[in-house]
Image: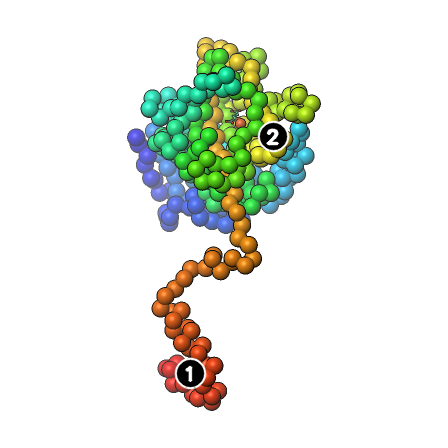
Amino acid sequence: MSTVLQSVVPATTSTLNAPPPSGLAEAMQVDCVTIRGTSLCLDELVDLSFFTPEARQRLRAQLSAAVPFPHLVVEGLFNPDLLNLVLEEFDTHRAAGWQDVQSSYERTRRSVPGAAIGPASQLYFDLVNSGWFTTWLSDVSGAPHLIPDPLRHGGGLHESRTGGSFAIHRDFDRHPKTGLKNEMVFITYLNRGWQPEWGSALELWDAKEGRCVTTVQPEFGRTLLMPHGPASFHGHPTPLKAADDRPRRSVAAYFYTGTPLLEQDLDRAISVFIAPRRIHSAKATLRRWMPPILWSLMKKTTQH
Ligand SMILES: O=C(O)CCC(=O)C(=O)O
Ligand SMILES: [Fe+2]
């Protein structure tokens, strides 16, 4: 596996997890990575025009207004060179790293939660799981303090082959291991020149009316952000039949929220120090009992 770190301008540290969203471009101009001979500069992994305050507002309005339930489809958010490398890694993913799902509802396969994935795929997930990216997801979706899932439960690499399908469903409410609340799924499709007649477009349904309202074709470079809610029924129930038996591939990540602290429990969010606290309380007692003149005299003498 050849992942080479290359300095282009004087490198400081990797900023994938660091900067406040406002200083994104500046903060990311530090380095490039080379994966299997393709150089990817960190400030070009995403199209930064999606990250301006205006874009965040516009995307949020677009997401809220979407039918039959809030969702957002964007094109070209990720550098196509990165996505090409991710796509290649489906072919080299170890057999033991795949989990087949074959039931009357689903015929597909996914990478095993926590399985090692290729460097480009790992870079993609590091990117979408990073603080500045999840802040963007929060701004666009309205769900604050999103928590990513490094094990990628339900997400990871997704691949359906000829005959594959996924009945209309609503995703899980809770992460089975952490119990965290599922807020959204974020999917990037990886299929160049996808034809609608091949089936397997993602259908978004109005469950009450029992009909598909809109579809998302799984075209290369298209990204779907779909908040999880009571009405978010979706699936690709039409069995896949693509030219040359080519597979339908995507990468998916779920994002969660925890339970906010109640007002009376806010002190549980503070670290507990042993020594300084003792000193602090001893000082407080002294102050209470000492005549003010002595207190200020003592302070003056101990300050030097
Ligand atoms: O691949 C897609 O278009 C949707 C996948 C999905 O609904 C799921 O994994 O729960
Ligand atoms: Fe789903």
Dividing the image into 4 quarters, which one contains the N terminus? top left
Of callouts 2 and 1, the N-terminal one: 2
Instruction: Say what secondary structure mark 1 lies in.
Output: helix
> SS for tag 2?
loop
Give percent across and percent down for residue 160. 46, 19
| The C terminus - image quarter | bottom left
Mark 2: give few (<14), some (14-19) or many (20+) Cα within 10 Å: many
Instruction: Report the disc number at residue 232.
Output: 2
Q: Position of residue 71 (x, y in %)?
A: 61, 32
**Quarter holding residue 39:** top left
The residue carrying mark 1 has its beta carbon less than 8 Å from ligand 1? no
Q: Position of residue 252 (x, y in %)?
A: 48, 30
Residue at 56% across, 25% down:
169
The residue to which callout 1 is attached is 299
Counting from the top left corner in percent of width and height, residue 214 is at: 64, 23
Q: Amino acid at mark 1?
A: Lys
Q: Nearer the viewer, mark 2 or mark 1?
A: 2
